[in-house]
Each structure stands twice: as C-alpha cells, then as structure tokens.
Amino acid sequence: MRKGIRGQYIIAHDGERHNLLENGHIIIEDGIITHVGSDYTGNVDEWIDAGGMMVMPGLVNIHAHPISTPLMRSMREERTGPPQYAGLWLTWALYDEVTEEEESVISEYAVWELLRKGSTTAVLVSLAYPDVLVPTIERTGIRAYVAPGYREASWTADEAGRRHYRWNVEQGERRLQQTLDFIAEHDGGADGRLRVLLGPEQVETCSVEMLERTAELAEDLDVGMTTHAAQHVAEYRHVMNRHGITPIQLLDETGLLNERLIIAHGIYLSHHSALGDDSGGDLEILGSSDATVAHCPWIRMTMGEIFESLPRYEAAGVNVGLGTDLAPQDMLAEMRSALTMAKAAEEGATGYSASSVLDVATTAGARGLRRPDLGRIAPGCAADLVFVDVTNLDLLPVYDPVITLLYSATGSDVDRVMVGGETVVRDGRVLGADEERLAADIQKVCENLWERITHRADGTPLHRLAPRALPRYDE
C-alpha cells in the first residue's frame, strides 16, 4: 500500500543534515519512505493531510526506565539529604518490591507516555520481568530496544551518603541468563520492532569478569550493550579506589567501549569540574571509541548537576544521543533541557543551537543503535514520523517553526505518531492503549507499592523518604 503525507512543514534529511521542507510530500511504501520532496505525481492509495503541523523524524530515545518512571514521578525531583540516600536507594527498593502483575501495568504506562510524547524508538532498561513488556510492544507499535539488566552487587547508603556494597555473584549470573533467554526468545520479535541489548546495570556493580563476558557475548550474538557509567561522583571515586582507573577506562579495558555500547549519563569524566583532575583523559578515550553517551539533562538538572558539556563532547568526537531516563518521558521537553544546559555550561546564549540538538535526538541516537534508517526523513528510511501541532494558539505566531518546536512545544502538542508507516497515535491518543483503564490501574498499583516500601525502611513513613513540597493542612 502506498501512503502519502502532505505537510506545510517537514524536517527532511538530505543525506548530510536536516532541512526544512515547506509544502512538501512524503511517500511511504511497506513502511519505508520512498520519496520526499515538493512534488509527487504518482498514484497514492491513501493521503494524510498534515495541514500546518510540523512533520519531524521519529525521536530516538536511548535511555528510559519503564518501571521507575511512573513510580518515581514527584518523588525524586525534590528531596533532602544526599541524592544517593533518598533517590537511587528508593528506586532500587521499589524495583525489588514490584510484582510481575504490577510491572505489567507500570511498563505499559511508560510505553504509553513514550509514544504519546513522540518517542518512536526507545531503549528500555532495568526490568524485573521483561516478558510482561512484550505484549505491550506488540500492541502499541513502539520500536523498542529492551535491556532487562543484571548486576552482581547492590548498595545502600546511610544518611551521610556513604555507600555500602553487597555482592551476590549468583544473582548476577541468574539475571544474565534471564537476558540471554530473552534474547533467544524475543530478539527480532514484534515484526522486527523488538530488539534486545545486554545490560550490565552499572559499571561499579559488575565485576571485571562480568564486563568482559558481556563484551564477548555482544560480539558473538551481534547485539548492542548499555550500562550506567560516570553518573555519580561517588561511583567515580569507588571505581578509582577499587581498580585504580576511571569508569571510562574500566569500560575500555574490559572491551565494552566500542560502537555497540550506549553509556547512560556519562557526566563525570575525568575533566569534570566536580572531580578536579583531568589526568585520566576520559574525553579523548571516549571520543576515539565509537561508543555513544545517552545524555539525560532534565533529571540531572533536578539534581543540580551539569553535563560539561554537550558541545565539548561533540568536538572531541563523542556521539551523544538523548534519553529521558525518568518522568516525564517527553523528548521535546528533553531537547529544550539539553539546549538550556549546553548554553549554561558554555556560559553563552550561542553555546548550542536548535539544529544541533535535533541531531542529538534523532540521528545520533540512531547511530548509537547502529540504525542509519532511523531518525531521519529520507528515501530508504523507516517511516517513523511525529506530527506536532505548531498551529496551537499557545505556539502562535510562528516565525521559525523549528525554533518554535524546540523552544516552546512539549509532548502534549504531539498529534499523530507513525512507526513503520502505521499510525500508532492519532489525535493525541495512543491507539494500542486503553487510556481510561490505564489511568485507574497505574494510580492503584503505585499507591500499593508506595505503601509496601515503608516496611523496607524499618517503618519510616514514605513522606520522610520522599518529602512532599508542602505540609498537609490538617497536620
């Protein structure tokens, strides 16, 4: 079937860069773009009139947590005490407590939000029961790279933020085997939209042997990898004390630092001002490795942390893509955060450009997944498209539609989403989701989990673990 799209604004790729095509056409056959341009005279079975909307490439989100996204909404944005205590500890506790049935609801909600707000491709990490995600991927039409995750150590932190590691090698082996079984059963499923990544959870919670084994398995199975690394000062110090090298150097020495790897966060490289020592040369090592960094600016901004800096990484040759990490899973808002953080880091309004951040959210992420057919509107590419209504009254008037898109629009302005030429979001509604049921279920499931987690903290009330913004009036 041949589909055609008419649109006033289209972000089209010419093989080198994104361009703005006005009053253009996109032709799709069997899920692949076959023509982009101002004129088309061939036959079309179905025309879609995009009107005054912006038709942009599907956004490639290379780091998202489908469990902790809804669970941690409004719990991590503000807190007292060290972030290690009230933030990640609580995330891991909820992760360990969740049941298979609860994860089914939670992950469905996360996929709903990702699609609703423009992520046509998403890397989904850290799942306790990855099998429950498969029906959601099949039903909603998202393009997903799933990394169930495994680690040999977990940690807790005291009120002062001091970490205490507990090693369980057998548990790490079980979780790795779960990933291998998931690859064997599901990689390439959902009409090719479901792929699986090897995911050692954090560089400091896996042994050297586990990291080396991951690199070997990735090569043997021809799959990608993702891990958290250089995400905290405490992690950097721990790896330096334990191994005598930086987290980036550890990834390099164990064979992970190559074109298959996506590094979540990658903030605390040896040059970072919070470390005060650039003797490691991390940026240069990373720039020559072909590995990808998943930049997640919004969640780090809420923690008072800064990426130093997006232009500097790119100048060093590092491929930097964009991820949302936790709520909100809104890639349009995340692009604006990336722009803002880059300008703040460079201490100037011209520190970074809208056109550059568009690459980060599309083609750079696609490169990290080794998918040159994603993240661009061009002949031969997958017809993954996002329609954003820039004619909304709150976005008018439009002088430059691309700048309007990146500085003013949010995921709520997304009207239609297509994956592989099939419409999966129409009029702002995810077609493969029962939104009314999901709204009721997600609130109930999370409230039950929040109630149970107080028992994991020796009865400490949840509002002390995650303080509310305002005291209750009746208290």
Image: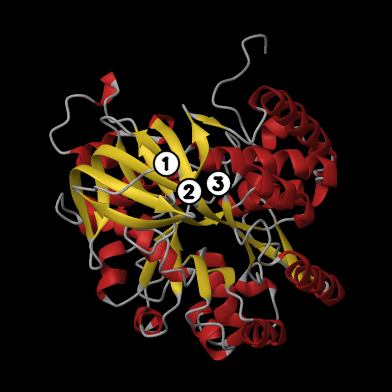
Residue type, label 3: Leu
Identify the residue under disc 2: 1
C-alpha distance separating marks 3 and 2: 38 Å
* Location of residue 451 by image quarter: top right
Rendered residue at 72%/63% (across/down): 155
Toward the viewer: 463 or 397?
A: 397
**Vertically, is 100 above or below 197?**
above
**Vertically, is 20 above or below 214?**
above
Proximity of marks 3 and 2: CB atoms separated by less than 8 Å: no
Point out residue 328 in the picture as x, y percentages from the top left corner.
51, 39
Judge depth for marks 3 and 2 and give the one in front.
2
Identify the residue under disc 1: 45
Toward the viewer: 27 or 136?
A: 27
Q: Residues within 10 Å of mark 2 (few under 14, many from 20)?
A: few
Proximity of marks 2 and 1: CB atoms separated by less than 8 Å: yes
Residue type, label 1: Asp
Rendered residue at 58%/45% (across/down): 81
Image quadrant holding the C terminus, namely top right
Residue furthest top in the image: 474
* Disc 3 element: loop
> Which dot marks residue 163?
none
Identify the residue under disc 3: 326
Residue type, label 2: Met
Toward the viewer: 170 or 46?
A: 46
Point out residue 3 in the picture as x, y percentages from the top left corner.
41, 44
Q: Earlier in the sequence, mark 2 or mark 1?
A: 2
Q: Earlier in the sequence, mark 1 or mark 3?
A: 1
